[in-house]
Image (cartoon, rainbow, N blue to C red):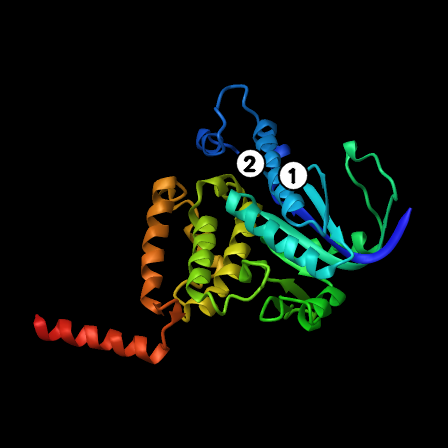
């Protein structure tokens, strides 16, 4: 057996339990948007199988693109691990982008500590690992709601103070529970799109990507089945709440900050989870954020305010 210190990312696909226990009523529309034909023989388990296939594709992509980590899937959850903490953070970041962009909600935990794995293994039936880091990563995953990643103190220190870490600039939020004062550290994967972990030189591209992600969570038809259950709506609401909070960092204003309760109140309105509404909304939003940038950089807030005032003055005098 091989024993060493390293980081483990445990990730769980949200909503599978509700599906397999028939707590979600699937529509013909749900099957269609996932490339399945609806028939009397179409079951929740068949639908779930398609989701797990997509989940596996996202994992396979990480296995190819991130050579410093190992990957193992166990049904609707997976482990990604390495001796290199930064490599695990970067793989977790890439996986979450891939997963949510594909239409899947996943949540994870990352912990550092002892990892034990076989020195030689029959990989035809997959990897297996155990150890303190594995156990703590599983526990951290349950720290909150939404498509988020929660980390322990050692991973936090490595991500914010290590000279080799690209995740120093706002990639971790320390969240305080006002009821008991406890602290939870969230690795904000949605604030970093590349291995550099720094979008300051690409603010316009960052704004477009984060707005696309937010719009997918709000209106993509692939999340329709998540929205069909109470727990699924909570997971979506917390995802939208946390991700939308970060939009002000990339756009320079709070126009796209959406509270979770606002999203829940709007659920089910006018069947907005359809391809046409999603594409139209995304198109409008991407055009809108152009107003806040010059040469790929955020406009000065005062300059933008003066431009608005000037436009308003001209309109009133021309009438």
Q: Is residue 273 above or below residue 133?
A: above
Q: Residue at x 67, y 44 (%)?
A: 63
Using a 10 Å C-alpha cutoff, classify the residue at mark 1 as few (fewer than 14 neighbours), some (14 to 19) or many (20 or more): few
Q: Is residue 143 in view?
A: no
Q: Nearer the viewer, residue 157 or 246?
A: 157
SS under mark 2: loop
Instruction: Report which quarter residue 312 is drawn in.
Output: bottom left
| N-term-proximal mark, 2 vs 1 | 1
Question: Who's the residue at 59% across and 52% down the image?
Answer: 94
Q: Is residue 261 visible?
A: yes
Name the residue nearer the viewer: 116 or 87: 87
Q: Give residue 258's quadrant in the image.
A: bottom left
Report, in whole angstroms, how far the alpha carbon at label 2 lies from the one at label 1: 10 Å
Q: Residue furthest left?
A: 319
The residue singled out by tag 1 in the image is 17
The location of residue 269, given as percent across then percent down, is 38, 46
Side (left or right) of 233 relative to 257: right
Is 291 on the left-hand or right-hand side of 140?
left
Residue 283 x, y percent position in the rendering: 33, 51
Q: In terms of depth relative to the viewer, which is nearer, 57 or 119? A: 119
Q: Residues within 10 Å of mark 2 (few under 14, many from 20)?
A: many
Q: Is residue 145 left or right of residue 208?
A: right
| Disc 1 element | helix
Label total for image: 2
Q: Quadrant of the C terminus?
A: bottom left
Residue picked out by circle 2: 24
Q: Position of residue 47 (x, y in %)?
A: 56, 30
Q: Residue furthest top?
A: 40
The location of residue 23, given as percent across then percent down, is 59, 36
Q: Residue at x 51, y 32 (%)?
A: 26
- Does residue 201 lie above or below 144 as drawn? below
């Amino acid at each position: 057996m091989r024993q060493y210190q390293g980081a483990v990312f445990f990730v769980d696909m949200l909503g599978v339990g509700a599906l397999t226990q028939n707590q979600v009523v699937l529509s013909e529309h749900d099957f269609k948007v996932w490339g399945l034909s609806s028939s009397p023989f179409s079951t929740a388990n068949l639908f779930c199988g398609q989701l797990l296939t997509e989940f596996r594709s996202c994992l396979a992509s990480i296995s190819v693109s991130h050579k410093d980590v190992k990957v193992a899937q166990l049904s609707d959850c997976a482990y990604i691990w390495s001796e290199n903490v930064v490599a695990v953070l970067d793989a977790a970041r890439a996986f979450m982008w891939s997963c949510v962009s594909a239409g899947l909600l996943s949540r994870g935990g990352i912990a550092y500590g002892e990892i034990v794995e076989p020195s030689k293994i029959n990989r035809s039936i997959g990897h297996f690992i155990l150890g303190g880091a594995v156990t703590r990563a599983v526990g951290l995953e349950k720290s909150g709601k939404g498509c988020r990643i929660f980390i322990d103190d050692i991973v936090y220190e490595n991500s914010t103070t290590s000279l080799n870490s690209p995740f120093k600039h706002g990639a971790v939020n320390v969240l305080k529970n006002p009821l008991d004062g406890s602290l939870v550290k969230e690795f904000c994967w949605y604030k970093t799109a590349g291995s550099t972990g720094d979008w300051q030189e690409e603010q316009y591209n960052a704004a477009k990507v984060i707005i696309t992600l937010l719009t997918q969570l709000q209106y993509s038809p692939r999340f329709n089945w998540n929205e069909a259950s109470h727990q699924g709506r909570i997971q979506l609401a917390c995802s939208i709440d946390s991700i939308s909070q970060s939009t002000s960092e990339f756009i320079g204003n709070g126009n796209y900050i959406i509270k979770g309760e606002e999203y829940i109140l709007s659920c089910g309105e006018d069947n907005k989870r359809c391809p046409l509404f999603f594409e139209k909304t995304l198109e409008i939003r991407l055009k809108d954020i152009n107003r806040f940038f010059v040469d790929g950089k955020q406009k000065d807030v005062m300059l933008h305010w003066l431009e608005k005032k000037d436009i308003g003055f001209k309109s009133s005098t021309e009438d």
